[in-house]
Structure formats: C-alpha cells, structure tokens
Image (cartoon, rainbow, N blue to C red):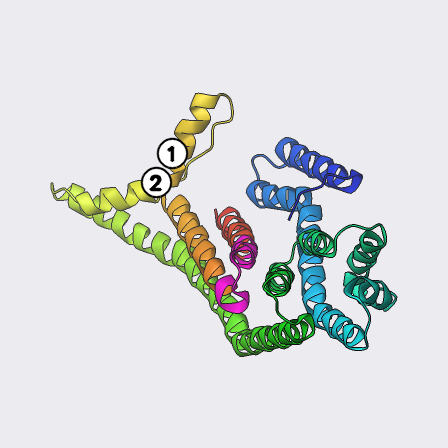
C-alpha cells in the first residue's frame, strides 16, 4: 500500500507530537509518562492505521466483485459482442469498489487503446494479486489461441474457489485467533503478577537473608545479583550519554527484561496469527503491532503504578 500524506495525516502527527510534549512537560516523573508515550504514538500513526484497514477492506471487496465482472463479460462475449464492446457494455453495471476501475477500463478501450494493454492497466491499478494473476492468465491464454469465453469461465471458477478457500480458512482460524488474543492477555497478567508481586517478595526475602548472612560473616552472591536486577533505574534526560547509559541499565533490570520479553512474544505471536488467519505477512505485522502496543501500554502502566 502506497503511503499518501494528506492534511489529516499531518494533523494526526502534529497532535501526537503535542501529546508527547505535554507528557514530557507534565508527566515526566509520574507513572503515566511511558504509557502516555504509547498513546501519543498511537495518535500520530492512527490515520495510517485507518488507511491500512480501509485498503484491506477495499481489496477484499475487489476480490469479491471481480468474479461477477468476469461472469458478465463472458456472457456478453457469448452473445456475439467483440471483447472491446463487451467491456464497454458490462461497465454500466455496478460492481461496488471495482466500478471505478471497470469504467476506466471501458474508457481506455473506447479511446482505441489495445484491449490487452487496457486489461493490464486495469489489473495493475487495482493492486490486487488475485486480479493481476487472473488477467495475466486470460491474456496469455488468448495469445496462445485459446477461446476467451472458456478462459473467462475458468478464471471465474478459479477465483470463486480461491475465495471459498479463504473464507473456509478464516472461519476455521477465527476461534483460534480469539483464543490467541485471550491467551496473550492472560500471559500479560501472569507477567505483571510475577514482576510486581512475586519477584519483589522474593527480593525482600533475599535481602533479609543477606542481612542474616552478613551478620554471621558470610557472603550471598545470588542475593546480590537478584538485588541488582531488582534495582529501580531512573532515566537521565539531561544528556544523550546519560540517557544511553540509563537506558542500558534499565534494559538489564527486571522491568526492562519483562517488557522486552512481552514485546518479543507479541511480535512473533502476531506474525503467526496473521499468516495463519489470512496468509499475508502484512496481516501478521498488523497483529504484531496491535499486540505490541497492548503489551507496552499494560506492562509500563503496571510498572509505573506498582513502582
């Protein structure tokens, strides 16, 4: 999908920057600082998210209406019309999201553009893989001497079967998709309990053991290591070097490790879900970003509130 910057995109990004500035000025030392960064980023790219979902919906509608267009075109050709006149004739039918592309195809044919070139332009402008492959098959079959009516009927059957397979896969994976989201939310809950309740409790017990061992003249290396991991790291925003140093220390702390584990889990779980549900890596990236945003917001908010 090609990114097009419009006024609404610029407005969303400016509003996101304003939210980030407000967060930095008023919430820098509060538990809400990092979660509000997630909200600001989400606002900034919200319009691109909307474009992505609208484009996905349009692509699905194009695939659903394309068999109807091919079926009507094959019927017009069977009635004795030449291919060019048949395209112009069927362009008067409403095909939903496909209508503008069909009308443009008919206009190109009327302007004496060769039918093969007009069909290629039609397929490329839709940016739909199924339509591109189908049109390429029709052109190759006709150039090889095949009957275009039979080819169109075969293409229609093939596209309909592909659509049925996709619907069947989507229906079979839907329950697993919902289940995976629920499992991930439960995973976040377990992570928060371990991070904010269990590990601090263990650290408190270990610190008491350190005091007891110290009084007895011994050494407890394991306790010291756990105590180091449990340390609270304050981010240094005064300089770039200070920020990098404090960020590195935070990443190696318990809070940083748990957040990174949650983000890694969200990223790979989303890719798997998208590939299984829709067979498209872009859908996997969509699920990954959704899960990573949820994980980042929930974990950082829990860390701030419990800190």
- The boundaries of the magenta stretch are 274-290
The picture places residue 122, in percent across and down from the top left corner, at: 72, 55
Q: What residue is shown at x 82% (from left), y 70% (from top)?
A: 81
Residue indicated by mark 2 = 252
According to the picture, the residue beneath numbered tag 1 turns out to be 248
Helix, strand or loop at mark 2? loop
Q: Is residue 290 above or below residue 243?
A: below
Q: Are marks 1 and 2 in contact (CB under 8 Å)?
A: yes
The residue sitting at the left extreme is 217
Disc number for residue 264: none
Question: For this view, does 260 lie left or right of residue 30?
Answer: left
Residue under the image location 47 percent in, 32 percent down: 235
- Judging depth in this view, the residue of 196 and 152 nearest the camera is 152
Residue at 79% across, 60% down: 102
**Which of these two is toward me, 30 or 37?**
37
Q: Position of residue 71 (x, y in %)?
A: 74, 75
Specify the farthest residue to the right.
Answer: 92
3D distance between C-alphas at marks 1 and 2: 7 Å
Neighbor class of circle 2 (other Cα within 10 Å; few <14, some 14-19, many 20+) is some
**Residue at image coords 74%, 36%:** 10
Q: Residue 265's x, y, as percent?
A: 42, 56
Does 190 appear above or below 217? Answer: below
All told, the count of numbered labels is: 2
Most foreground residue, 68 or 292: 68
Secondary structure of the residue carrying numbered label 1: helix
Q: Position of residue 115 (x, y in %)?
A: 74, 56
Q: Is residue 57 magenta?
A: no
């Amino acid at each position: 999908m090609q990114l097009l910057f419009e006024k609404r995109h610029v407005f969303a990004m400016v509003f996101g920057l304003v939210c980030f500035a407000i967060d930095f000025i008023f919430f820098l030392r509060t538990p809400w600082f990092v979660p509000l960064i997630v909200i600001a980023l989400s606002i900034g790219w919200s319009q691109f998210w909307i474009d992505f979902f609208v484009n996905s919906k349009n692509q699905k509608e194009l695939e659903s209406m394309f068999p109807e267009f091919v079926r009507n075109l094959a019927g017009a050709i069977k009635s004795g019309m030449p291919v060019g006149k048949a395209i112009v004739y069927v362009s008067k039918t409403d095909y939903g999201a496909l209508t503008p592309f069909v009308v443009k195809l008919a206009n190109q044919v009327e302007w004496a553009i060769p039918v093969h070139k007009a069909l290629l332009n039609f397929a490329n402008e839709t940016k739909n893989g199924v339509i591109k492959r189908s049109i390429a098959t029709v052109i190759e079959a006709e150039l090889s001497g095949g009957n275009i009516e039979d080819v169109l009927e075969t293409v229609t059957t093939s596209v309909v079967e592909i659509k049925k397979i996709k619907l069947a896969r989507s229906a079979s994976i839907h329950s697993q998709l919902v289940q995976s989201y629920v499992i991930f939310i439960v995973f976040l809950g377990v992570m928060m309990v371990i991070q904010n309740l269990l590990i601090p409790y263990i650290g408190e017990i270990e610190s008491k053991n350190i005091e007891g061992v110290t009084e007895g003249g011994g050494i407890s290396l394991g306790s010291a290591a756990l105590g180091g991991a449990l340390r609270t790291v304050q981010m240094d925003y005064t300089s770039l070097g200070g920020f990098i140093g404090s960020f590195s220390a935070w990443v190696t702390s318990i809070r940083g490790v748990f957040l990174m584990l949650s983000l890694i889990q969200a990223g790979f779980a989303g890719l798997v879900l998208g590939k299984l549900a829709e067979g498209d890596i872009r859908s996997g990236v969509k699920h990954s970003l959704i899960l990573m945003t949820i994980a980042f917001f929930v974990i950082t908010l829990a860390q701030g509130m419990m800190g």
